[in-house]
Image (cartoon, helix red, strand yellow):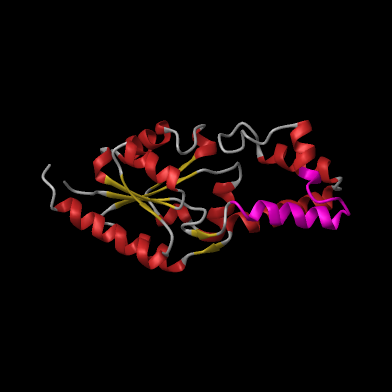
Amino acid sequence: MTIKAVVFDIGGVLEQVKDEAWPKIWIGGWERRMNLPAGHVRAALTKRASTGGVMTGEMSETQVRELYAEVLGLDDHQAHQMMAEMWDAYCGELDIELTNFAAGLRPDFATAILSNSADGSRREEQRRYGFEELVDIIVYSHEVGVAKPDTAIFRLTEDRLGLKAHEIVFLDDYELNVQAARACGWHAVCHRDTAVSIKEIVVTIEQAAQLPG
């Protein structure tokens, strides 16, 4: 059994960023800047609208900007600054060691990105990090209308790679997504530390090569 592709998540993996922490920090900063009480934005969004469709492309970048600008009471200049700060926080910093590892996998292996995302992610991440040149394919949830851990997005990625489930190893920092990938028949590693993840991917590839099939 041979692994033919390595698939990477972005946030918390290729990008060093805490997905659960940065929105609170970003929103909290703007609440303080606008002299609003902590929790104002969350309470207002609960009453006015849901941002739950961001990852599946049901809410555009423009709609996100307009919603947050309204809730925070921002003018156009402030709204522009808010979004710029959002993207800086969203994209974090590049994990150079892991990115170099990913780049070195080709041409021996196909490589891909599979990321839960929001409208504008491809533009912002390409501008900063050039992910389109790093891997063979990128599957963004907001572009395909389905997000991890839904089985459909793993099957779609298989189809785009032209590979079978057992030929893929996946790196993600959320255990739920790792378990979902394994349930689909993928090999999967839960990312906690770059050096450890690289070693585990290499070991997984080596072990798979020793299996029949």
Q: Relative to residue 155, is residue 33 depicted above or below?
A: below
Q: Between 199 and 119, which is closer to the camera in this rendering?
A: 199
Residue 14 location in percent, x, y?
Answer: 47, 58
The spot of residue 86 in percent (x, y) is 68, 53
Q: Is residue 58 visible?
A: yes
Does residue 73 show up magenta in the picture?
no
Residue 106: name its quadrant.
bottom left
Is residue 23 covered in magenta? Answer: yes
Describe residue 145's horizontal placement relative to residue 99 as left or right. Answer: right
User: Can residue 138 be seen from the camera position used here?
Assistant: no
Quadrant (top left, top right, bottom left, bottom right) of the C terminus: top left
Q: Which residue is found at the position 78% from the left and 32% from the top?
A: 47
* Residue at the extreme left: 212
Front residue of 177/95: it is: 177
Instruction: Residue 191 in the image: state x and y as whole percent.
Output: 42, 57
Tell me what residue is drawn at x 75 percent, y 42 percent.
42
Compared to 206, does 3 lie above or below? above
At 52% from the left and 36% from the top, the residue drawn is 143
Q: Quadrant of residue 65?
A: top right
Q: Nearer the viewer, residue 51 or 113?
A: 51
Q: Position of residue 170 (x, y in %)?
A: 35, 49
- Determine whether, in the image, residue 154 is placed left or right of residue 108: right
Tell me the magenta residue range: 20-41
